[in-house]
Amino acid sequence: MAPISLSIRKATPNDLTPILTLVRSAYRGESSLRGWTSEATIVDDQRIDEKGLLAKINEPNGAVLVAYDNSENKPDDIVACCELLKQSDTLGYFGLFAVNPLRQAGGIGKFVLAAAEEYARSTWGLRELEMSVIWTRAELIAWYVRRGYTVTEKRKPFPYAELVGGKALRDDLYFVVLIKAL
Ligand SMILES: CC(C)(COP(=O)(O)OP(=O)(O)OC[C@H]1O[C@@H](n2cnc3c(N)ncnc32)[C@H](O)[C@@H]1OP(=O)(O)O)[C@@H](O)C(=O)NCCC(=O)NCCS
């Protein structure tokens, strides 16, 4: 993979379609299996719809961040994204994390996670960031632990009834919550 020079910006409603495409390609279906970690074998839905994504982009207490290749000054050429939500004066939530499956395992994920942590610190003064990961995804949980996250005792139910245009492929899913002091 060619080296990439990245910048981060806050997404706007104009980014809706490329972010939707990116998220679905990274989490679901055959395209996601080109990356090193995906949910294709555990959930067969669309991950998020336009309405849900637009709500996250417009969330006053949150931000969807996108990373783009700035070597050719193409801010619309989105290679990765994530969501931040301010849950209290000190705690934030990190989610909707996706890197184009054709560009994974080259450091983009690490760059975006670090940029999101810095954004949460500098924009809202947050002290802790948490995230939810499906318990079966041991390789991904290990990746977050290497980035300084701790696996807590906290569990969250899997939203079986709210999946978008599809279904789960197992009935034993739930989330584990990871947290990091910023
Ligand atoms: C999770 C994700 C965002 C990481 O992005 P990325 O650009 O691939 O991450 P990086 O290149 O920064 O890091 C690659 C890491 O993967 C590890 N890795 C690569 N192939 C691997 C494999 N087959 N098994 C386990 N780890 C692997 C590398 O060792 C490296 O980790 P290290 O630097 O700690 O050793 C990306 O894989 C993705 O979009 N996945 C699908 C969506 C998803 O699962 N999102 C998270 C939901 S909580």
Image (cartoon, rainbow, N blue to C red):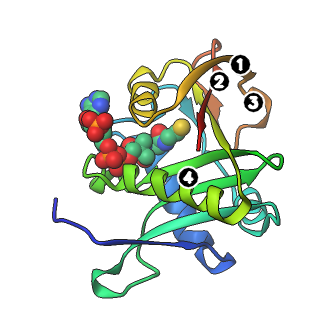
Spatial CA distance of label 4 from label 2 is: 21 Å
Q: Secondary structure at mark 4?
A: helix
Precedes in sequence: disc 2 or disc 3? 3
Residue denoted by label 4? 117
Give the secondary structure at mark 3. Answer: loop
Q: Is mark 1 within 8 Å of ligand 1?
A: no
Quarter of image, res 174: top right
* Pick the front one: 85 or 97: 85
- The residue carrying mark 1 is 155
Residue 107, position in %: x, y? 29, 52
Q: At 34% across and 56% down in the image, what residue appears?
A: 108
For the residues labelled 1 and 2, say whether their Cβ atoms are less than 8 Å apart: yes
> Which disc is residue 175 wearing?
2
Q: Are marks 3 and 1 in contact (CB under 8 Å)?
A: no
39 or 7: nearer the viewer: 7
Q: Which numbered disc, 1 or 4, marks the residue that appears first in the sequence? A: 4
**Disc 3: which residue:** 159
